[in-house]
Amino acid sequence: NLTIYDSDDLSNENFMRWYYSGIFNAGKKASRLDLLLELMHPEIQVDAHNEDIDATKLIEEMASADYIVFTIGTSDTQLRLNQILRENSCKAKVLFAWLEAGGQHSHVLRIDYSAPGCFECLFTDETGNMVNNQANVTADEIVELNTIRNGCGATRAAYGTSVLLRTTSVLLDVLNKEELNPNAGNYLVNISPDSVVYDGSFAKEVCHCCGN
């Protein structure tokens, strides 16, 4: 059973990454994923919501979910949802996956909220102050160099298919590890074009969300 929340539309800018490409080049991503996945894998039951998840829906979902996976591009939203999960003693295992602004590096963060560590730890220094994401490996000048301005705003993550494939592969590997060793502790996975490094030292005791 798979539940999907996503308010995004399919468009010319993103449907080239889809398995069936332009066949589904209109409509909502969540609804199209529902149809596509159930056609490919009849044993999967998909519940699609053409909207972004909010606090109320997240609290409802966490009561029955085994895993919650966030692939959200904004840190503010991730921090807010992380706080909700901690405050409501989420029992599900949670995975945050995101790309860095340079479009080459990415991360997967595995969180069990009964153990030390949460997403906010990545934004907390040794004294408990909030700082820039410590997992960010992209320098400001590289971000500026890779920013595309095309007359309709700009994108800071000029990413290609390769970083998506790398990140998805690691995400699936993490889920597989969870089934084999569900008590592995919390860890951050740093993904680059050349390596995949598992780091279990990211938790901060002074984190205002999960610290002592």
Image: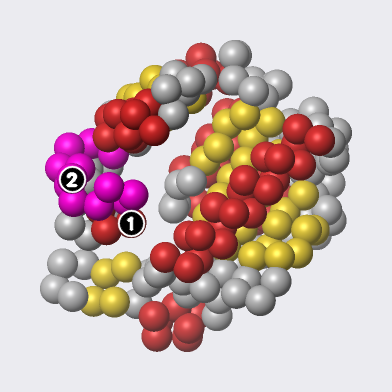
Up-down: is 165 above or below 46? below
Residue span colored magenta: 18-30
For badge 1, the amino acid type reads: Arg
Check disc 1 and report its element: helix, strand or loop: helix
Residue 61 at least partly seen = yes
- Measuring 80% from the left and 28% from the top, which residue is drawn there? 114
The numbered mark at residue 17 is 1
Check disc 2 and report its element: helix, strand or loop: helix
Place residue 211 in its image quadrant.
Answer: top right
For badge 2, the amino acid type reads: Ile
Q: If the image is split into quadrants, where does the C terminus sit? A: top right
Q: Are marks 2 and 1 in contact (CB under 8 Å)?
A: no
Up-down: is 74 above or below 136? above
The numbered mark at residue 23 is 2
* Residue 26 among magenta residues: yes
Judging from the image, the colouring scheme is secondary structure
The tag earlier along the polypeptide, 2 or 1, is 1
- Measuring 21% from the left and 67% from the top, which residue is drawn there? 153
Up-down: is 66 above or below 207? above
